[in-house]
């Protein structure tokens, strides 16, 4: 909208000056009009974003507040706004209220709301890079908490791979209309690899903070290892299928819909898949992360010889790894070019 207003104003000045020159008074009036429109547009955006911050802080005060606000969002956006009957809303609520209020679902919603708050904190700063710097400690704490609770979010990971601005919270708060676009931020909390590749590691590289950069790599390894359901298992992470209410138990069991049997089978499969994922992570993903960490140590640290030896050790210990030939090629290049950060290609061997 702002771009459209600015373009219209420019065209007004251009067309007027080409047909008939503006007087000094008219030029002043046009400039004042543009400034007034700018202030109104940005002023209303700032007001809405600040109100959104207060709302999100309020709904995070308790699980009950979170679930109630979520239900209000669903009712307003998916029923009232599209003209559905009140009876349809009551029927949906009856079928879904228990799972919407479940501990796991509410916890996932709260992490979604917290991430939206972090996004707003970045957006509210005039300079995005300054916003990222300001929230960086909170962002890392966020992932410490999220990965600690990750096993408690079973079945609700879809909420956390959904872009925050596509959430019902953001929709009801009209944030897509008032949030500026962010270039140095990510859309969603998961997968963990995205936030490290696009936000955390680039931030510490730019800051030239070698110790913080290495500490961030250590955090990344821990955080990725604890979110294997997203990083490596590829399982469906959405909410359970919304079955019609009132299915008789004998019919449900006949068609394999018995909740107790399904839950036991899912638990067994989860244990099996987790073992596979942990082994895959140790053999395939962990060496890639170690390579990235030591490559950054070479490019941004002070002990090039030690870093080169560590990179060589990673290849030696993982000769069968699919990336080993690429690592060797890169090691030769790094050893030849030296450890000048100016020669760093940020897209090379990206973990």
Image (tube, helix red, strand yellow):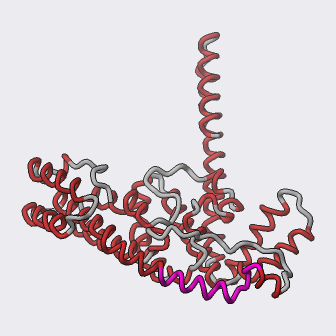
Total marks in image: 0
* Residue 159 drawn above or below residue 343: below
Q: Residue at x 86, y 81 (%)?
A: 246
Q: Is residue 216 visible?
A: no
Q: Residue at x 60, y 15 (%)?
A: 17
- Main secondary structure type of the part rendered in magenta: helix
Residue 319: say if magenta: no
Question: x and y percent of residue 313 in the render?
Answer: 14, 68
**Residue 133 quadrant:** bottom left
Left or right, residue 23 beside residue 280:
right
* Residue 58 drawn above or below residue 117: below
Residue sticking out furthest to the front: 254
Left or right, residue 17 beside residue 118:
right
Q: Is residue 245 visible?
A: yes
Question: x and y percent of residue 38 in the render?
Answer: 61, 41
Q: Residue at x 29, y 64 (%)?
A: 288
Q: Residue at x 68, y 64 (%)?
A: 168
Q: Quadrant of the N terminus?
A: top right
Instruction: Give the magenta part as a residue range.
Output: 255-272
Q: Nearer the viewer, residue 333 or 74?
A: 333
**Residue 144 quadrant:** bottom left
Question: x and y percent of residue 11 in the render?
Answer: 62, 23
Residue sticking out furthest to the top: 19
**Residue 195 quadrant:** bottom left
Left or right, residue 120 beside residue 70:
left
């Amino acid at each position: 909208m702002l771009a459209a207003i600015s373009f219209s104003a420019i065209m007004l000045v251009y067309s007027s000056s080409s047909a008939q020159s503006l007087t000094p008074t008219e030029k002043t009036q046009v400039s004042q009009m543009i400034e007034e429109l700018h202030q109104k547009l940005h002023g209303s955006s700032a007001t809405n974003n600040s109100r959104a911050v207060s709302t999100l802080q309020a709904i995070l005060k308790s699980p009950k507040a979170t679930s109630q606000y979520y239900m209000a969002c669903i009712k307003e956006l998916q029923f009232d706004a599209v003209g559905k009957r009140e009876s349809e809303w009551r029927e949906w609520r009856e079928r879904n209220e228990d799972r919407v209020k479940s501990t796991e679902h509410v916890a996932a919603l709260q992490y979604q709301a917290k991430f939206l708050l972090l996004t707003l904190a970045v957006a509210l700063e005039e300079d995005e890079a300054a916003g990222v710097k300001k929230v960086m400690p909170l962002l890392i704490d966020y992932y410490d908490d999220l990965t600690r609770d990750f096993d408690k979010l079973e079945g609700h990971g879809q909420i956390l791979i959904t872009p925050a601005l596509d959430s019902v919270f953001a929709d009801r708060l009209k944030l897509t209309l008032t949030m500026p676009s962010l270039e140095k931020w990510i859309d969603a909390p998961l997968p963990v690899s995205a936030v490290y590749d696009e936000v955390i590691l680039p931030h510490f590289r730019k800051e030239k903070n070698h110790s913080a950069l290495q500490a961030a790599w250590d955090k990344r390894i821990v955080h990725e290892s604890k979110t294997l359901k997203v990083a490596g298992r590829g399982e469906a992470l959405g909410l359970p299928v919304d079955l019609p209410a009132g299915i008789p138990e004998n019919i449900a069991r006949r068609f394999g819909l018995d909740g107790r049997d399904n839950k036991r089978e899912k638990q067994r499969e989860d244990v099996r898949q987790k073992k596979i994922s942990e082994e895959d992570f140790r053999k395939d993903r962990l060496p890639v992360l170690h390579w990235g960490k030591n490559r950054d140590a070479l490019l941004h640290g002070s002990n090039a010889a030690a870093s080169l030896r560590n990179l060589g050790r990673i290849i030696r210990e993982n000769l069968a790894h699919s990336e080993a030939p690429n690592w060797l090629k890169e090691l030769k290049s790094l050893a030849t070019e030296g450890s000048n950060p100016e020669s760093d290609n940020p897209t090379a061997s990206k973990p």
